[in-house]
Image: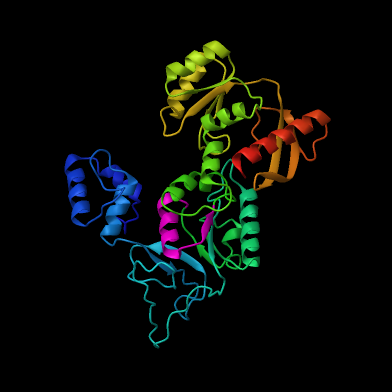
């Protein structure tokens, strides 16, 4: 199944029958695959399949993309993972699987990717495919991060699958894994490379969604803590934080059933904004103006009863939208910029017209926005 390209998550989804579950349980116990991920009945999860295949020695190998058609030893840092190999093409820090170097017919070792003497390896997660909410701005952030890491003497390892990005150029990083940004793939590469840490903050929503799972598997996340990331991504936790910091926000409520959403709208009135957690900017969010729209959206979008809470809040019509972009260090605001939207709130940032610096904001509005940013920066220890 792994050689055919099936992910652990897909395999887990297929192991639903009682016979398959019993087989999984017996094999895991028989192979000594004990610990927190030992299967104990119930729904088979991705981590169960991962634990099982690792106990069976089913692990990916790192291969170089041969850019010279096998005429000469390849010296490229373009890498990929495969289950069809028997050994790695490059030297790796992780020694849990075969790390022999392939021999050329002449007896010379096959050339590895760029050899470096840098003190530590840092993995940088790219943005993945371009789509609404994730575009070239995150590629710029990734490249800036990579250049800074290399300047500071670190070995930069990039994981990205988008050939349109500058971060996937051959001369930008020390090693480039042309792979999908999934929990399974990033964890496999982290175990093989043994990096000092992983940067998730320069690739947008996709790397942010992986932060918690990587942290729970012992991968060190550099920069803002995983707990702070979760507080921002989890709409319920973030709304609670704003209340605690006395930051003004529209009336809001968490809901897990459609009935609770209808009850809130009846009390607060329409229009209302439905905001799921851990979603791409603007994705799966909707302004609803009636019970019919709310019912239709919740049924089609399937945002209720997910792993993370959904928040519904009162939507303020005709409001001016202002954006604060800031950099924090140890909880203190280092630098910031305030942009003013030409259109009123409700137009997606990718379609809106912004003025930088803001032209028509009162000085008091500017001061309050900065104060809110400083409060959040300190509370989250950014």
Q: Nearer the viewer, residue 281 or 330?
A: 330
Location of residue 116 in the rendering, given as x and y in whole percent from the top left corner: 55, 74
Would residue 58 be visible to someone looking at this image? Answer: yes
Residue 252 vs 151, above or below: the answer is: above
Q: Residue at x 64, y 33 (%)?
A: 348
Q: Is residue 352 visible?
A: no
Residue 188 is covered by the magenta coloring: yes
In the image: residue 147, left or right of residue 189 = right
Q: Position of residue 242 (x, y in %)?
A: 61, 29
Residue 164 picture location, percent across and down: 58, 56
Residue at point 68% right, 46% down? 327
- Residue at image position (62%, 62%) is 149
In the picture, residue 39 is in which quadrant?
top left
Seen in the picture, residue 217 relative to 358 is either above or below; the reply is below
| Front residue of 136 and 95 | 95
Q: State which quadrant residue 283 falls in.
A: top right
349 inside magenta stretch: no
Which residues, given as a range, are shown in magenta? Answer: 181-199
Residue 148 falls left or right of residue 49: right
Q: Residue 310 location, x and y as percent?
A: 49, 28
Q: Quadrant of the C terminus?
A: top right
């Amino acid at each position: 199944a792994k050689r055919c390209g099936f992910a652990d998550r897909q395999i887990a989804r297929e192991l639903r029958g009682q016979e398959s579950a019993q087989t999984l349980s017996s094999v895991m116990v028989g192979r000594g695959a004990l610990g927190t991920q030992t299967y104990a009945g119930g729904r088979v999860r991705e981590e169960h399949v991962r634990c099982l295949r690792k106990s069976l020695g089913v692990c990916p190998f790192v291969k170089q993309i041969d850019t010279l058609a096998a005429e000469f030893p390849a010296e490229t840092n373009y890498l990929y993972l495969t289950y069809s190999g028997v050994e790695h093409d490059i030297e790796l820090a992780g020694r849990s699987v075969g790390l022999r170097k392939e021999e050329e017919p002449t007896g010379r070792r096959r050339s590895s990717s760029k050899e470096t003497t840098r003190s530590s390896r840092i993995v940088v997660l790219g943005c993945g495919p371009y789509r609404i909410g994730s575009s070239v701005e995150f590629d710029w952030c990734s490249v800036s991060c990579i250049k800074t890491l290399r300047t500071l003497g670190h070995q930069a390892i990039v994981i990205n699958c988008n050939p349109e990005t500058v971060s996937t150029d051959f001369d930008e990083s020390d090693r480039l894994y042309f792979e999908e940004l999934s929990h399974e793939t990033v964890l496999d590469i982290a175990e093989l490379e043994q990096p000092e840490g992983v940067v998730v903050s320069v690739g947008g929503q996709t790397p942010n969604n992986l932060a918690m799972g990587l942290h729970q598997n012992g991968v060190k996340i550099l920069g803002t803590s995983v707990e702070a990331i979760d507080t921002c991504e989890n709409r319920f936790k973030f709304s609670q934080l704003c209340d605690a910091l006395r930051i003004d926000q529209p009336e809001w409520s968490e809901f897990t059933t459609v009935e609770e959403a209808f009850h809130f709208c009846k009390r607060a009135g329409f229009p209302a904004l439905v905001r799921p957690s851990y979603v791409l900017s603007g994705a799966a969010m909707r302004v609803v103006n009636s019970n019919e729209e709310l019912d239709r959206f919740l049924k089609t979008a399937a945002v209720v009863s997910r792993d993370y809470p959904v928040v519904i809040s009162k939507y303020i019509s005709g409001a001016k939208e202002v954006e604060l972009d800031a950099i924090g260090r140890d909880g203190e605001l280092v630098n910031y910029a305030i942009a003013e939207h030409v259109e009123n709130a409700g137009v997606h940032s990718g379609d809106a017209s912004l003025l930088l610096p803001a032209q028509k904001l009162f000085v008091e509005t500017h001061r309050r926005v900065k104060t809110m940013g400083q409060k959040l920066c300190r509370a989250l220890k950014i």
